[in-house]
């Protein structure tokens, strides 16, 4: 089974967003992250517009603005980790939501979507709590 070419930008963005959270990655990788995420978001804007999914196009426009490499928005490390986690979850969701209408829906796909949604909610809540406690100085 081959991965569709249209899913590669979103998958690359997810990998970059999760890698950048680690403290190993620094300056040049951050610029590469901005570039990859911005280009992927712009690509998904056009794909979402072609599929008439306006809410996804607007979401990807917001991500493209947030991660643009020309005028980067600087966030504290804790806030950036939270933003990267949320945006990674959005890109993973886009792999499922922004797809051709020819792909059929089934009960299994609905169950997978609900499971992924619950998992993402748990991840976002846990990362939010971690960032909150990190800002309070409890883990320092």
Image: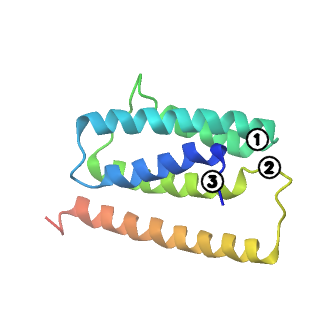
Checking the image for residue 54, the label placed there is 1
Q: Quadrant of the C terminus?
A: bottom left
Mark 1 or 3, nearer chain start: 3
Disc 1 and disc 3: Cα gap in Å?
25 Å
Compared across the picture, whether 78 is left or right of 37 comes to left
Residue that carries the numbered disc 3 in the rendered image: 3
Q: Residues within 10 Å of mark 3 (few under 14, many from 20)?
A: few
Badge 1 element? helix
Disc 1 and disc 2: Cα gap in Å?
15 Å
Residue 122 horizontal/vertical position (percent): 49, 73
Mark 1 or 2, nearer chain start: 1
Residue that carries the numbered disc 2 in the rendered image: 100
Q: Give me the residue at 76% from left, 36% from top.
A: 49
Q: In this view of the protein, which residue sits in the foreground, 6 or 19?
A: 6
Compared across the picture, whether 77 is left or right of 108 comes to left
Q: In this view of the protein, which residue sits in the foreground, 135 or 118?
A: 118
Q: Give me the residue at 35% from left, 48% from top.
A: 80
Residue 35 horizontal/vertical position (percent): 44, 32
- Residue 74 seen from this side: no
Mark 3 or 2, nearer chain start: 3
Q: Quadrant of the N terminus?
A: bottom right
């Amino acid at each position: 089974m081959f991965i569709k070419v249209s899913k590669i930008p979103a998958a690359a963005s997810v990998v970059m967003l999760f890698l950048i959270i680690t403290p190993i990655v620094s300056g040049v990788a951050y610029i590469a992250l901005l570039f990859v995420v911005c280009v992927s978001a712009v690509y998904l804007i056009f794909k979402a517009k072609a599929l008439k999914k306006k809410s996804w196009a607007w979401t990807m426009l917001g991500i493209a603005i947030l991660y643009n490499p020309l005028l980067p928005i600087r966030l504290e490390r804790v806030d950036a980790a939270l933003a990267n986690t949320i945006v990674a979850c959005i890109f993973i969701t886009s792999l499922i939501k922004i797809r051709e209408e020819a792909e059929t829906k089934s009960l299994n796909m609905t169950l997978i979507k609900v499971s992924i949604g619950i998992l993402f909610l748990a991840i976002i809540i846990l990362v939010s709590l971690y960032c909150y406690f990190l800002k309070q100085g409890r883990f320092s």
